[in-house]
Amino acid sequence: MGLRKKIRKYLYTRKFNNKKILNPNYSGKNIFITGANSGIGLELTKKFLNLNNKVFVTYRNNSENLDKINNKNLTLIKCDQKNLSEIENIKKEITDVPINLLINNAGIFGPAEQNLETLNFNDFKDTLMVNSLSGLKITQIIINVAKRNSLEMVVNISSDGGSIKINNQGNAYIYRTSKSALNSITKNMSIDLFNKYKVIVFAIGPGNVKSSMNPGGMIETTVCADLIINLIVFHGKKLNGKFVDLLNKEIPW
């Protein structure tokens, strides 16, 4: 059974239709989400705000979709995550703020053509920065300048395209490399941050989600966001160092 059918079946079981699942008790938190002006990040932002949380979000250039939300608990931070100096500016917004949950969601695919024969190695820089290194840097900033011992969980939005074991298609060198790097960072942080601060770190591979980056995707972003929140609230404490899909099935690294 494909992931879309599994999700459809999951959504319409008694378990998922339970009010507790649709409206989880997850409020009063300070949540930081990167890449939030569209797609998964935008839907997560709306849903966490509806659950009565304060949400800090980054966007690159256009905040049009975020501006429409008009919620006093939403803080917008302009940040091109290709640019290290702009990432450093996040410090001004979160110094001594008790950030409880970080979701490193920002991502780009990179050039449309990524086959071996025509690879432009200059194209690796931006994709690696956005998809993997910026998440590492933002985590470092939160650990160092946000209110001490407030961070509870880091969730990295990865991709099964970053899995080495299940790669049987090749191609997409830049994107796959960036997500493999994010997976390695996730595993490292799950050891270091848990041992030092008891922070849980895990990665999610959402699958074929419909977005501006993937308009032909089969999974609606609102469904994806619901399932990510479900993972965080009901399974997160058991996921340190794991890489899972939306239904909490482990994906090989």
Image (tube, rainbow, N blue to C red):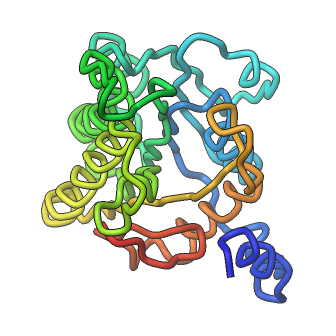
Quarter of the rendering containing residue 81: top left
Residue at (48% x, 34% y) in the render: 106
Observer able to see residue 173:
yes
Quarter of the rendering containing residue 193: bottom left
Residue at (65% x, 39% y) in the render: 214
| Left or right: where 153 falls relative to 189 | right
Quarter of the rendering containing residue 114: top left
| Left or right: where 148 falls relative to 66 | left
Question: Where does residue 218 sit, x and y in percent of width and height?
Answer: 74, 55
- In this view, the residue in front, 240 or 166, is 166
- In this view, the residue in front, 209 or 36, is 209
Residue at (36% x, 53% y) in the render: 162
Locate the N terminus and report the quarter of the image it occupies: bottom right
Q: Is residue 13 above or below residue 38?
A: below
Residue at (42% x, 56% y) in the render: 169
- In this view, the residue in front, 204 or 96, is 204
Observer able to see residue 146:
no
Question: Where does residue 199 sit, x and y in percent of width and height?
Answer: 29, 61
| Left or right: where 51 falls relative to 237 | right
